[in-house]
């Protein structure tokens, strides 16, 4: 096949076409034509059936309807709006809309589609058609829109919307009018050309105006001499240039688009390419006639020529049938003499499909209704084994290998079917026609194509599902991260707010942070904590001094042995005291010594030590000593209260250590939880001691705390120095512990 | 003698260094981010995301197969998918676990829907639309038929139905066309 980057028809090729050269395509068959039964009489009018069923759904798409049940409609009135690529559907006679429902469509599937059912009134009253005064003054787009609004589709059989074909045709060199009608029995185009040749030429004029081709070829098979003669007469009368009539040899399937292009131009259309890429566009002669009616007369596509033929029909011939006319109405009119197993074929015997029942309407693509009897179309004989005779390969117009395709179709080998170009099969049926084993090859290919098609659709759907699934996963993941971030931000904000406004819990956090800082800096901090360590240092220094003195004394007055002994004892005592004093500063033992409580500094030290312990591990100790559980709870509470105070005094501590604030918060939470636990352990005792005073004390303490955390460092020393204050704090803590125990 | 050996060793060392550097660069430059086998296996799987294989979606199952799991755990894919997986992994085909069902899509009886959004949360491909206390509906074109939305529905208003057939998705009816389709020849 030609695969040059530019497949456009060359000037040289056009010259050859003009000179009368003709080409041929591979294969083809010569079935019995059976055209004379229907092409001898004039086209008759099928008349107005009592009901018209006009399908408005197209490939599952439903357009917006302009009518509703009960509406009166006139002939030519649009029933639908333009919906995407869909064409407008019209009422084909006047009457009343009786139903809008699903009715069986003229389609091999026999599926119901949404249809407008019109009960005709027999008046056939028409709307006023809006004519275009001079189409030559209109733009292409306006004419194409008019064609869409007229509801014109390809009348040759496929039903492709004509406006799309026109809109997508750019740089057209050759316009081919397909009047080949190669399928046996069908004579609709033949009669149309015989009776309306001048209108067809006018329609070609319109197309030429839109497409501006260099050349127009009307292709007719040479088995239609009357049609050729009629067109020749019309051509002589008209002044149109650039139109040539080409009579081509009768051979099936020369009416197929790509085969006809090969006959006329000698060029093959590459697989999966459109003829417009070659600069060629093809329109069926019936479509050309419909375009003439739409543009010149302003009349939409309301009817088409249908060949009524087959030996089961008493009358035969062509009829102008309104779209939507029930086929049963036509069969009655043409006097069907049904046989036992009467077949009804829409289209020709080679490419048509069988109807399951006759209660379906004529559609725009229905060119023939064939009602054969048993002699004409006997029951298919059972298929026999393929003998590999190769007849099918010889007749295939697409040069495929049908017998190979049969094997692969039977074994469902989709890959091999693709390699053997099954998708380019035009389903013409030539292979099955010549098969000596009566194998219905085309049926196998149709099924295989359907399977490949559905497999492709499934794969597409799977791909969509995969993408949707992955997008969803990504979205959920993102949402999760966002949520976490939001929570983190909210927590930080809350912390900040508390720090700025309430102070409450944050003070504990600050205290814990400070305690931790102290713990970490324990070796050096002794010097930094004047209240606590100074005392110890002084005491130690004094003790050392005393010890030295005593030692010095004991050395020199050796003449006084009684004294030396005393001195040694005194030194030992002093050392012991010093040790004790030093110990008192690091252990809580100092708190139990009432004598030292007077000392404000020591008290402060004890309080801080307690705070430390409470924050770190005091409750554990309390729990390990069940007898002291009440005390532990109280101690924890006291520590909390004191820690608060301490933190108030040194509120800048957490600010100097911002990286530890988070840890502090966590530690605070842990400490709180532990304190609660401890309180819970002693709840029984606590409950018995609950009294009003404690509640009052607690309230006072809360007030005090609010006041306290605003105060400065200086206040701290005063408060911590106050023993009384400490006692109040203890009471408050006790009350609080009770309260929390009570709550639990 | 010594010189020639030294030259040989030196040359080989230089060559080794050059190729080592080249390979090192190539391994970085042409690095395959994901295991291509997983992608290939995932492409074979039907992407229903139904979880019938025991993994939360098709890709995790593809990963599991690549790591040596059985190939016969995908009932929606059926025999065809199992055979493709067997071919890809170079293992013997096995009978698919669970029954192969015809393709169905979810359908919500909208009059019974209370708008709880549970089915929306269950749907792995976002094929259900709706909002809290608003009626939900299934986009049947996007539905993979995984049935994951059926169980969470508190009013049991979700049923699995065959997808609607129209002239677009209709296929030649394989049963009414009187031909034999024997695969043994």
Image (cartoon, coloured by chain):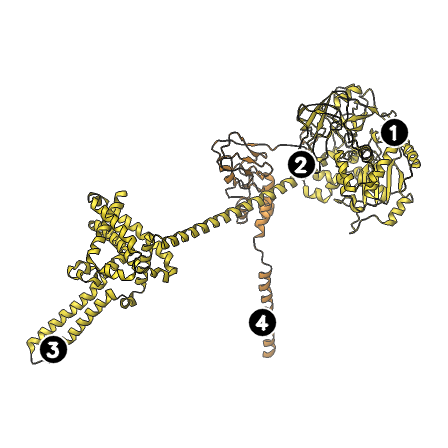
Chain colours: A yellow, B orange
Figure check: A306 above or below A643: above
Q: Quadrant of residue A290?
A: top right
Q: Which mark is on residue B13?
A: 4
Distance Cα–Cα, label 1 vs label 4: 93 Å
Closer to the eye: label 1 or 2: 1
Are circles 1 and 4 on residues that touch, CB within 8 Å?
no
Figure check: B120 above or below A302: below
Distance Cα–Cα, label 3 vs label 2: 121 Å
Chain designation of label 4: B
The residue closer to the viewer here, A98 or B5, is A98
Q: Are marks 1 and 4 on the same chain?
A: no
Q: Are marks 3 and 4 on the same chain?
A: no
Q: Are marks 1 and 2 on the same chain?
A: no
Query: For numbered disc 3, what is the local secondary structure?
Result: helix
Query: For numbered disc 2, what is the local secondary structure?
Result: loop
Residue matched to label 2: B183
The residue closer to the viewer here, B127 or B21, is B127
Closer to the eye: label 3 or 2: 3
């Amino acid at each position: 096949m030609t695969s040059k980057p530019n497949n456009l028809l060359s000037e040289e090729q056009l010259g050859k076409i003009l000179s009368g050269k003709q080409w041929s395509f591979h294969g083809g068959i010569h079935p019995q034509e059976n055209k004379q039964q229907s092409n001898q009489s004039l086209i008759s009018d099928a008349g107005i059936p009592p009901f018209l069923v006009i399908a408005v759904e197209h490939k599952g798409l439903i357009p917006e309807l302009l009518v509703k049940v009960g509406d009166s409609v006139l002939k030519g009135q649009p029933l639908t709006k333009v919906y995407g690529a869909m064409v407008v559907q019209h009422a084909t006679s006047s009457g009343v809309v009786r139903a809008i429902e699903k009715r069986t469509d003229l389609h091999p599937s026999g599926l119901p589609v949404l249809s407008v059912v019109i009960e005709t009134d027999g008046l056939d009253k028409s709307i006023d058609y809006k004519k275009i005064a001079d189409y030559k003054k209109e733009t292409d787009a306006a004419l194409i829109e008019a064609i869409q609004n007229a509801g014109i589709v390809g009348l040759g059989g496929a039903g492709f919307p004509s406006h799309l074909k026109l809109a997508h045709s750019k740089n057209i060199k050759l316009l081919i009018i397909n009047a080949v009608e190669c399928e046996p029995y069908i004579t609709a185009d033949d009669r149309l050309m015989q009776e309306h040749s001048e209108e067809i030429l006018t329609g070609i004029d319109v197309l030429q105006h839109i497409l501006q081709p260099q050349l127009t070829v009307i292709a007719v098979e040479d088995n239609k001499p009357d049609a050729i003669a009629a067109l020749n007469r019309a051509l002589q009368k008209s002044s149109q240039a650039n139109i040539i009539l080409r009579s081509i040899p009768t051979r099936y399937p020369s009416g197929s688009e790509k085969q006809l292009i090969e006959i006329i131009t000698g060029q093959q259309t590459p697989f999966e390419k459109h003829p417009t890429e070659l600069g060629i566009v093809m329109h069926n002669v019936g479509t050309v006639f419909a375009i003439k009616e739409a543009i010149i007369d302003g009349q939409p596509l309301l009817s088409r020529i249908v060949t009524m033929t087959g030996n089961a029909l008493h009358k035969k011939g062509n009829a102008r049938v309104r779209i939507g006319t029930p086929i049963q109405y036509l069969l009655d009119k043409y006097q069907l003499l049904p046989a036992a197993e009467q077949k009804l074929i829409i289209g020709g015997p080679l490419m048509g499909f069988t109807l399951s029942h006759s209660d379906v309407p004529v559609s725009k693509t229905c060119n023939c209704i064939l009602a054969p009897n048993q002699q004409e179309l006997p029951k298919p004989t059972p298929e026999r084994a393929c003998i590999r005779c190769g007849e099918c390969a010889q007749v295939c117009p697409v040069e495929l290998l049908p017998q190979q395709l049969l094997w692969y179709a039977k074994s469902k080998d989709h890959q091999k079917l693709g390699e053997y170009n099954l998708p380019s099969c035009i389903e013409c049926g030539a292979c099955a026609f010549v098969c000596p084993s009566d194998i219905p090859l085309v049926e196998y290919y149709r099924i295989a194509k359907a399977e490949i098609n559905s497999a492709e659709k499934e794969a597409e759907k799977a791909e969509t599902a995969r993408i949707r699934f992955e997008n969803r996963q990504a979205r959920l993941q993102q949402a999760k991260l966002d949520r976490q971030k939001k929570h983190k931000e909210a927590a930080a904000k809350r912390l900040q707010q508390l720090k700025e406004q309430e102070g409450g819990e944050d003070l504990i956090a600050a205290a814990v942070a400070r305690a931790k800082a102290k713990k970490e800096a324990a070796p050096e901090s002794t010097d930094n904590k004047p209240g606590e360590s100074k005392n110890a240092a002084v005491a130690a220094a004094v003790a050392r001094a005393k010890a030295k003195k005593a030692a010095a004394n004991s050395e020199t007055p050796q003449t006084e042995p009684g004294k030396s002994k005393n001195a040694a004892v005194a030194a030992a005592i002093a050392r012991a005291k010093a040790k004790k004093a030093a110990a008192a500063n690091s252990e809580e033992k100092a708190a139990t010594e009432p004598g030292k409580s007077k000392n404000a500094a020591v008290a402060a030290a004890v309080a801080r030590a307690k705070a430390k312990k409470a924050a770190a591990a005091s409750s554990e100790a309390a729990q390990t000593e069940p007898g002291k559980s009440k005390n532990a709870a109280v101690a924890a509470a006291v520590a909390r209260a004191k820690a608060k105070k301490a933190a108030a005094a040194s509120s800048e501590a957490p600010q100097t250590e911002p990286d530890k604030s988070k840890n502090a918060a966590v530690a605070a939470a842990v400490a709180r939880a532990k304190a609660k636990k401890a309180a819970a352990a002693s709840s029984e005792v606590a409950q018995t001691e609950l009294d009003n005073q404690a509640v009052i004390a607690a309230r006072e303490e809360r007030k005090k705390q609010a006041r306290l955390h605003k105060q400065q460092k200086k206040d701290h020393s005063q408060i911590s120095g106050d023993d009384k204050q400490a006692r109040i704090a203890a009471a408050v803590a006790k009350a609080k512990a009770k309260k929390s125990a009570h709550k639990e | 003698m010594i010189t020639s050996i030294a030259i040989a060793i030196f040359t080989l060392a230089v060559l080794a260094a050059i190729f080592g550097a080249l390979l090192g660069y190539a391994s970085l430059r042409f690095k395959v981010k994901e295991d291509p086998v997983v992608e290939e296996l995932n492409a074979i799987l039907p992407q229903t995301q139904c979880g019938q294989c025991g993994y939360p979606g098709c890709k995790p199952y593809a990963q599991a197969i690549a790591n040596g799991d059985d190939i016969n755990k995908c009932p929606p894919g059926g025999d065809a998918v199992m055979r493709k997986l067997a071919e890809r992994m170079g293992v013997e085909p096995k009978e698919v676990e669970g029954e192969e069902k015809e393709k169905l899509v979810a359908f919500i009886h909208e009059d019974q829907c209370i708008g709880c959004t549970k089915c929306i949360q269950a749907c792995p491909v976002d094929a259900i639309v709706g909002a809290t206390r608003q009626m939900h509906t299934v986009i049947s074109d996007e539905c993979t038929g995984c049935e994951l939305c059926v169980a969470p529905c508190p009013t049991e208003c979700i049923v699995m139905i065959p997808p609607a057939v129209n002239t677009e998705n209709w296929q030649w009816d394989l049963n009414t066309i009187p031909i034999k389709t024997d695969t043994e020849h």
